[in-house]
Image (tube, rainbow, N blue to C red):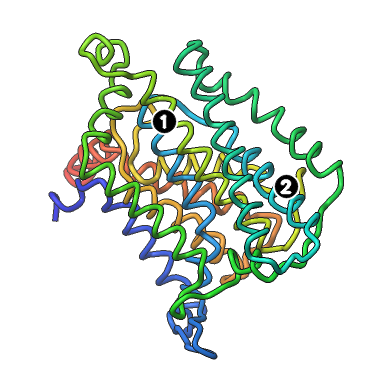
Amino acid sequence: MTNLMKQRLFWPVAMLALLLIGNLIFEPGFFSVELRDGHLFGSLIDILRQGSPLMLVALGMTLVIATGGIDLSVGAVVAISGALACQQIAGLDDQGAVGGVLVAVALALLLCAGLGLWNGFLVGVVGIQPIIATLILMVAGRGVAQLITDGQIINVNSPPYKTIAAGFLASIPVPVIIAAALVAAVALVIRRSAFGMLLESVGGNAGASRLAGIRSRRLIIIAYVACAVCAGVAGLMVSSTVSSADGNNAGLLIELDAILAVVIGGTSLLGGRFSIAGTVVGALLIKTLDTTVYTIGIPPEVTLLFKAVVVVVLCLVQSPAFRARLSRRQPAEVSA
């Protein structure tokens, strides 16, 4: 059991299981999953669906943090992606045209990749500290989204675009499939190639990696581009959910939830050590926590405090130093 508790994913998974059981106590049908009109519905399905955008943003953030960086601009990228896609779709003669929607989606993701390239250039080539480099786009990005939408909330009525957030494929929600596919693709690239090891090498010591012949600048740029594209896909999901683009509020503060999910999953903020599976568990834990707040009827005025307490408890039990200190005190208390 002691060895199991030392596993990186033990405490996040244990806390996630505890939250799910807590929800089950307050709502006996919480684990029930129904098949209606060929589509899966239920609280667990809702957590997966609603957690998909956060999972994608956290996925990209994991790659960046693995290099020793951080990306504060992902929330702005989420807003820009949705803004450009909706602006393009709103200008179509037929918003139901699949081809037109695909072009809009491709343009949005292309712009996001360009924004990631900009962040990667500032960090990897110019040498600006990641928190400062991405703070520039975090501030300016909302302005870019407002410019794209002309300061208005753009509403669209496009069934193909709505499918990104509300569609089903083989009874499974489309956003869940998209998130699972991207997570699997990134995990495959990391585990089946040297990419993951090189990222950890750069995050551990970029200077030493460069001296060893690793092209650290290129890896850093790739990580930021991948992060921005993941945020762009999340932005498409967010805007598709409400069939509109809101440059001010879309993706607001999602960067903080993404960083929290990455940390909960066991990735080191200092770089050099990361876990994709841990990030997925962390994102699901945060979304389950949101669901728990509504399920057990926590008053809105103490919602943030409740979430903060749960996160603090989880971080403490994850800390080997805290557990070691706690275990040293227990015999002393018994002997007294």
Q: Is residue 201 above or below residue 107?
A: above
Q: Is residue 331 above or below residue 294?
A: above
Who comes first in sequence, dot 1 or dot 2? 2
What percent of the width, then of the height, locates residue 235?
A: 61, 50
What percent of the width, then of the height, locates residue 89?
A: 74, 56
Label 1 neighbour load within 10 Å: few <14, some 14-19, many 20+ = many
What percent of the width, then of the height, locates residue 86?
A: 73, 53
Residue lying at 41% horizontally and 51% vertically, measured from the top left? 282
- Which mark, by number, is residue 83? 2
The image quadrant where one finds the N terminus is bottom left
Residue lying at 30% horizontally and 10% vertically, measured from the top left? 207
The reply to whether dot 1 and dot 2 touch (C-beta < 8 Å) is no
Asked which secondary structure carries label 2, the reply is helix
Please state which of residues 303 and 260 is positioned toward the viewer in this rendering: 260
Going by the image, does 252 lie left or right of 53? Answer: right
Label 2 neighbour load within 10 Å: few <14, some 14-19, many 20+ = many
Q: Is residue 288 above or below residue 319?
A: below
Residue lying at 51% horizontally and 83% vertically, measured from the top left? 39
Going by the image, does 12 lie left or right of 232? Answer: left
- Read off the residue under disc 1: 222
- Which image quadrant is residue 144 in? top right
* Residue furthest to the bottom: 37
- Which mark, by number, is residue 95? none
Going by the image, does 280 lie left or right of 195? Answer: right
Please state which of residues 165 and 61 is positioned toward the viewer in this rendering: 165
Residue type of the residue flagged with mark 2: Ala
Residue type of the residue flagged with mark 1: Ile
